[in-house]
Amino acid sequence: MTAAVPADSETEQLRRQLAEAVDAARDAYRDTTRLIQLLDLLGRPTESAELIGDMLNVLSDAFFADVVCMAEVAGDRLLVSGSCGLPEDDPAYTDGWPVGEAARHTLATAEPTALHGDVRGDDVPGSMAGLDIRSAAWIPLSAQRYADSLLILFRSLDQPFAVADLRMLTSVAVRLRMALDEREHHAIIEQLAHYGHLLARHLEVQPLLDEAAGLLLQLTRADRAWVVTVEGGEGRLRAHRGLTPEITAAWPVPAKSLDDLPACDSGLPEVLKVAVARENGATALLYAGRERARPFAQGTLEIMTILANYIGVALTNAELYHALAERVTRDPLTGLANRSALVSHLDTLLSADDPTRVGVLFCDLDGFKSVNDLFGHEAGDELLMQVADRLRGSVRPDDLLARFGGDEFVIVLDRVKQLSEVAEIGARVCADLDDRLVVCGEQVHVSASIGGVLGVRGKATPSTMLRDADAAMYVAKARGSGQVEVFDEDASHRSRDRLDLRAELLLAQTRGQLHLAYQPIFALDSRAIVAFEALLRWTHPHHGTVPPDVFIPLAEETGAIVEIGQWVLAQACRQLAQWHRLPEGRGLGMSVNLSPVQLHQPQAAERTLDVIRAAGLHPADIWLEITEHSYLRHEVTEYAGALGAAGVHLVLDDFGTAYSNLSYLKRLPIEILKIDKSFVSGVTGPGGGHLDLSIVRAILAIADSLGLVAIAEGIETEDQRTALRSLGCRLGQGYLLSRPLPAAQAGLLLRPQSQMPARAHRVG
Amino acid sequence: MPADIPAPRPVAVTPATEPLNVGVGYSDAADAVTAGRAAAAEALAGLNGTPPELIIVYASVSYDLIALLHTIRRATGKAPLVGATTSGQFHDGRLIDPGLGVSVLALSAGPYRFGTASVTGVTENGDDAGQRLARAARTAAGPEPSAHAAVLLLTTGLAGHQQELLNGVHKVVGAPVPVVGGSAGDDRLLIRTCVFENDNVLTDGGATAVWIASPTPLAVVAEHGWHDVGLPLLVTKSDGLVIQEIAGRPAVEVFREHFHDEVDFERPGLIKPAPGYLSAYAFGLIQPDGSKLVRGAYIDEDGELRTFSPLPLYAPVQIVSCKAEDLLRVTGDVVRQSLAGRDASVLLAFSCVARLDVLAEQGAEEAALIQDAAGDVATFGFYTYGEFARTTRVAGYHNATLTAIAL
């Protein structure tokens, strides 16, 4: 048998079969490669944008498509979100093109659509008209019907997309969508992790909820997002993104209606709701909605729940802060603003840009101390709470009422035009308060002294305003209880100067600005010096000599008088001891003024005697001058008694002036009376002299009857001296005899001189 | 009788576009200044007095390129200039062998507007460079909208990333704008390739482009003439440019199996072929429509099979081969397709140095055939290290192919 040589036809057939096999292999390999390339891309850990770019490039290449694009439905148009083949400035990205029949069909059925030959114009973006598209495929990017995104391939090659092509494209599109969703999910989780905890930085609830609404919108890829809080059976819309005014106008709603999703009538087909779970505090609800019936991505609810947890933590945080801040800015007893809140509020008002002014009323209760003393601190607290309630009712809604401390309250009045308004409100508050209150079962009468000032924004400061109002209050109080005093600018200035002096007085002693002057007291008949009165002088570096009637009250207010008085006494004692060493100085007395404040100090008597003895003097060398006062306390009697027993001579100063009280003379071991200058200057005056003469005569009679020595103060004329002498006044001082002099000059007076009177015998 | 009133004659509204004037100049003077001056002068003379609006320069890398450009620019003035170093040039039916010569093309505006630009950074991020280049060139052509456009793209040949560059350009200009061009050569030295823009010489990593705005559609044509010599195969393992396995077997072994006795590997007359470069055999990358993109391949000194640009993962390939006559068979077709339906003045063509290698002593025939097919139309081109012809899909980088555009 010979080997069979294939006939030509057989060769031809084999050739054909080979060609077919080669074509089939080529197609198979091509498909394999396509799939591998596409799957390889999906598996790469690239970012979404890069994945889309690469995927569209490979699809263009592998499926011979001139243009491949991802498009999303927006209204009735398709908008391109990414493409390979459309110019970057193509209107398909921004304006899109109408959803054509093929796209509509694909979206509705979630099945791919392929056209060949007669690709209709309305299925192709206008800008591609020149490409002569012959074949196209619409691939759903989601397996769900009525999804909103498509993968679209356009080909100028006159070759249809085969069923196998469409199957592969559908499978790839769904995987692409999943890969993108997964990336988006990761990006959201990352965003959530990054921004969620930042919510806790908010210390105020409103900005916190506002940011939360923004974040909610972003994280859920929703069209609208809103945050609702439920308080007191009411659901309140606290923050939102994208809700129309018609919808926001419907809030608040009854809390019950919130249980029912449709009841919060947002008019949206897709709404997700998550509650912010919290142990205490207001409940919050988060809503995310979509305008079209487009389901939220899987896991959105989970994202919202995590966000809700962040919001819950942040809310608790903000509430804690609020409670703390409350504690810091509230007076715990009355619940009113405290001093620091007052100052910061006042500061805010004063820095505001507004032509109106700011008023401050400083209220100090009259007689609060006596309530405390009589009924105890609890009663005092109760009284303060009742007063706070009264004041709350008196102030205007925009005014700030604060407890400044103790029994002091401050009212800040915003938007005041003139001082008279401050005065009017002050008077009203005063009238409202002036009443009887029942405290711990006891009726108590309450009134307040009120000082008011007006501050110019940008100029006044909280501290100056409070200081001036305080000063005005003191002026009011000085006029009696239940009074109102308002300070205009001048009055404030004066009070301010006074306060400045008060502060400087504290330093005057250490700065060597205080010194003593000595005015001799003469025996009017013999013209002998029997004693000197030590007078305190303050030489201020700027104001010069500050009169004692200005600075002594200041020293008394601040309590500096105690130390200063001690210094004066020591200084005067040392000077007297020095003069005692002179032959002419023996038996000389030293009169030193005492402030009532000094008498209230513990062990005041011992300390006084210690100073006297320390200078080497006998208590009998010292005369202590006490000013008359309306009240006479137990301590004063005790003090005066102790000193009197030790031998100190007590002098009652300014006898006969307003507060003159004979009980002083009865209860205190007074030995000397000083007849006030006002009577002395009147004894010789034309016309009116008669009355003063009678008073002086009466005083001298009292002194005489009680065995006291009288000293006439302020003798300025020879006539006065003559008159006093004729009335039987033995001692006197005044400019006629000698002005107060510095120690050295005063010492000169002691020298025996022909014109000087002989030394008087010691008073006693 | 009323006098006949002649009806107003319709005025013929024909677009008063100037014809595109073309001038080609050449010099093989060794000195850059002498060569540049002569070639530029000759090219400008061809414009018949119309001002040049675009200058294209192809030159051997052996010149002092800065001096060359400077000289040409001095003659051509402010007209934008692009160009590339080559591995041979052709125009007027004539081949300029690798290693010498400068060819200058001067174009008047004609119906076109030209905008040129250049970028660097192709190696670092080809896609980004492509986007920047496309935007810049388009902007340089002016804001007036044009109905159609094409991009002439020249890149440095040894930088790689040609398809990425093309991806970037495509992302900006889209499918309606075809891209044509090539990778610069360096007389087969494989050391340094350059592209030019105006006075600038950009070496590897640089690219330049011309945005051609046109009132009529512009078409890019590409053909290679190679045919498969085996069954479809899958590249199953590769590492960058090294192909390790084909169909699960050692790649070199599979590659060699397809060699035919008739093929002569030792070809005379070439200055410096790549070592082991088997010009007659290559990979044909199977395309969705059944066509193939040619990807040159060679066996290197270490016996590894290499390509000039990376093949995609699991690339479906067929080993392809060709003889001189296969290549020359498509030459006329490319030219005819390019000119079909157009009243063109010039054909810009880009042919691969691999084709020149295969053609060997028949090298000059391609240039002659191109001019034959073009007739009166001027032809101007160079031998590249890879050609651009992006027509339909994003893929548009070719090897061993002849691409062309007619203006």
Image (cartoon, helix red, strand yellow):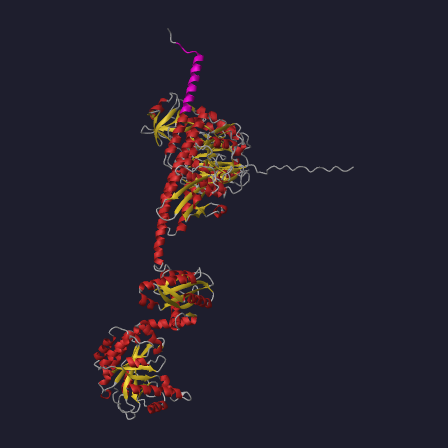
Is A708 positioned to the left or the right of B310 in the image?
left
Q: Quadrant of residue B9?
A: top right
The verdict on residue A23 being magenta is yes
Between B47 and A514, the one lying in front of the other is: A514
> Residue A288 vs residue A664: left or right?
right
Give the quadrant of residue A723: bottom left
Main secondary structure of the magenta stretch: helix
Residue A207: image location, x then y, percent: 41, 50
Residue B285 to residue A553: above or below: above
The x and y percentages for residue A692 are 38, 86
Screen quadrant of the N terminus of chain A:
top left
Question: Relative to the observer, which residue lies in front, A145 or A125?
Answer: A145
Residue B248 in picture, x, y percent from top left: 33, 25
Residue A319 position within the rendered picture, expressed as x and y whole percent measured from the top left: 36, 51
Quarter holding the C terminus of chain A is: bottom left
Magenta span contains residue A576: no
Q: Nearer the viewer, residue A389 or A518?
A: A389
Range covered by the magenta-colored residues: A4-28
At x 46%, y 47%, the residue is A251
Instruction: Look at 40% across and 38% down and name the residue there.
Output: A48
Q: Is residue A266 visible?
A: yes
Q: Residue furthest right?
A: B1
Q: Is residue B184 visible?
A: no
